[in-house]
Each structure stands twice: as C-alpha cells, then as structure tokens.
Image (cartoon, rainbow, N blue to C red):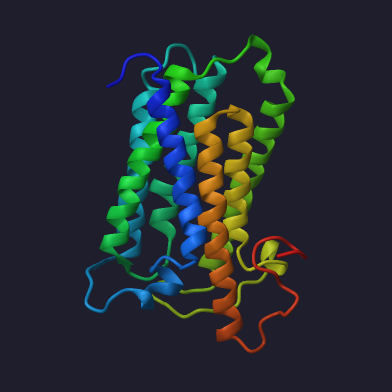
C-alpha cells in the first residue's frame, strides 16, 4: 500500500472518474440491468438481485472500512475520519441492508464484475485521499462547506432510502411486475431514488472539499442522471396513464 500522500495517483484516479462520467453521457445508453435488462445479449449468466448487489457494493464498504479502522482517534475526532465514516456508512447500508431487501430482476454477471472493479477503485481512491492526503483546519467542523455538505449528504441518503422503500412496496416477493411509483418525490419525478443519491454525493464532495469526491459526484450525476432519464422514458412507454407532469430527475424542470 502507498505510504504517505501520492498526489499523482489521486489526480489520475479523479480524472478517470470524470472521464467515465463524461463517457456515460456521450454514449447515452442505459446499463443493461433492471428495467433495461432486455438490452443484454440472450443467454448471459445472471445472478439473483440480492446476491448481485451484495457482491457489487461489498468492495466499497470493505476497502473504506479497512482504512477506517487504521485511523487514530475516535470516529468523531478528526474531520477526515468522520467523513470516511460517512462513506463507509453509505456502503454498509448498500451492502448489508439494501441488498437484502431488494426485489429486483436477476442481474447480469458481467455488469456485477464491472461494478466490483469500479467499487474497488473508487473505494480505494476516496479512502486513500481521506486517510493520507486530506488536511482540514481545526475549525472545519464549523465551516459552512462542511455543515451544508453534511446536511445535503444526510438529506440525500434519506431521500434515497425512502425512495427505495417506495419502489419495494410496488412488488410482492418474487414479482417482477412494474407499477407506477407514487408518493414522496415520485410525485414529481421518475428518478427519486437517483436524485437522492446524487444529492448525497454532492453533499459529500462539498463536505470533503476534495477532488476525488468532486469527481465521484460528477460521475454519479452523469450515471444516475442518465439512468433516471431512461427510466422516465420507460415509464412513459409502458403506462398510458403515466403522469405527464412528472419529470425525470429535477422537479418541474427535467
């Protein structure tokens, strides 16, 4: 493992995240899982949704947790330790709670493998930066960037968790039928769960005030924003009575 802060790998990893995000926008194609699984080549190996999400999200939690346990002091001591703890908490939820509750379609193994590679790389980048490169002044806990960033992170996480709950209630265990989501931000947009996670990572980028977190927030905006757009088109095609006033990602705007 690298010892001390190596700025060049951090910059390269951040640039790669930004490029991946821009590539998602350029290609403008939905990833072939969930509602868009029909885009996958027939006959491909698939995993049960719960196993797939667990395996895909686990590396981000494991890598960040491995860095976190090596940090000196308490979780609420240095700002970088607390911020790394928040990253770890997000992926704890995604790995051990969301994955066990999801009722999604079988998940293509090829996409799971790509997701694992991404989560290893991004988890290492974020955790490494906060562990070895981040330097915050003593008053960072009272800085507006930190306070607003933490508020947005928690707000986004709450929106994301609630929206996932709404989506789960549309199906009974074992069902793969699609229905129109109602309630919460789904009243206004088709991608409420995606908007929540985008807000979450934008808040994280603000609270950490770091290049890796900014690059990850940009990637999340591109990837999840594009997915919300394709979900919206899916709903409009599938349901004749889909609310025409509902937008894809941003209420009343887009």
Rendered location of residue 254, percent (x, y): 70, 65
User: Could you tell me which residue is drawn at 67 percent across and 40 percent down?
Assistant: 152
Judged left or right of residue 106, residue 192 is right
Rendered location of residue 189, percent (x, y): 68, 66
Rendered location of residue 227, percent (x, y): 52, 64
User: Could you tell me which residue is drawn at 75 percent across and 75 percent down?
Assistant: 245
Q: In the figure, 192 relative to 56: above or below?
A: below
Query: Which of the two residues, 183 or 82, is positioned nearer the viewer here?
Result: 82
The answer to which image quadrant residue 17 occupies is: top left
Q: Residue furthest bottom?
A: 240
The total number of labels drawn is 0
Judged left or right of residue 128, residue 82 is right
Q: In the figure, 68 relative to 217: above or below?
A: above
Q: In the figure, 22 relative to 108: above or below?
A: above
Query: Which of the two residues, 100 or 22, is positioned nearer the viewer here?
Result: 22
Q: In the figure, 82 relative to 72: above or below?
A: below
Which quadrant is the N terminus positioned in? Answer: top left
User: Could you tell me which residue is drawn at 70 percent across and 28 percent down?
Assistant: 145
Rendered location of residue 173, percent (x, y): 41, 71
The answer to which image quadrant residue 128 occupies is: top left
């Amino acid at each position: 493992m690298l010892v001390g802060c190596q700025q060049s790998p951090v910059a390269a990893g951040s640039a790669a995240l930004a490029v991946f995000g821009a590539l998602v926008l350029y290609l403008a194609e939905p990833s072939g899982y969930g509602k868009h699984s029909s885009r996958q080549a027939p006959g491909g190996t698939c995993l049960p949704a719960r196993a797939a999400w667990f395996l895909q999200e686990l590396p981000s939690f494991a890598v960040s947790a491995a860095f976190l346990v090596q940090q000196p002091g308490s979780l609420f001591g240095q700002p970088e330790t607390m911020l790394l703890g928040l990253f770890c908490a997000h992926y704890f939820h995604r790995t051990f709670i969301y994955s066990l509750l999801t009722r999604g379609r079988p998940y293509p193994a090829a996409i799971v493998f790509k997701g694992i590679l991404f989560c290893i790389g991004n988890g290492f980048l974020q955790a490494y930066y906060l562990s070895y490169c981040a330097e915050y002044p003593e008053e960072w806990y009272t800085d507006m960037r930190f306070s607003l960033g933490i508020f947005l992170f928690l707000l986004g996480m709450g929106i994301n968790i609630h929206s996932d709950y709404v989506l789960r209630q549309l199906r009974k265990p074992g069902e793969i039928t699609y229905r129109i989501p109602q309630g919460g931000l789904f009243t206004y947009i088709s991608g409420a769960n995606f908007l929540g996670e985008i807000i979450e990572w934008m808040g994280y980028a603000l609270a950490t005030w770091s290049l890796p977190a900014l690059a990850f927030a940009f990637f999340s905006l591109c990837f999840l924003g594009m997915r919300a757009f394709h979900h919206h088109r899916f709903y409009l095609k599938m349901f004749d009575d889909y609310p025409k006033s509902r937008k894809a990602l941003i209420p009343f705007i887009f």
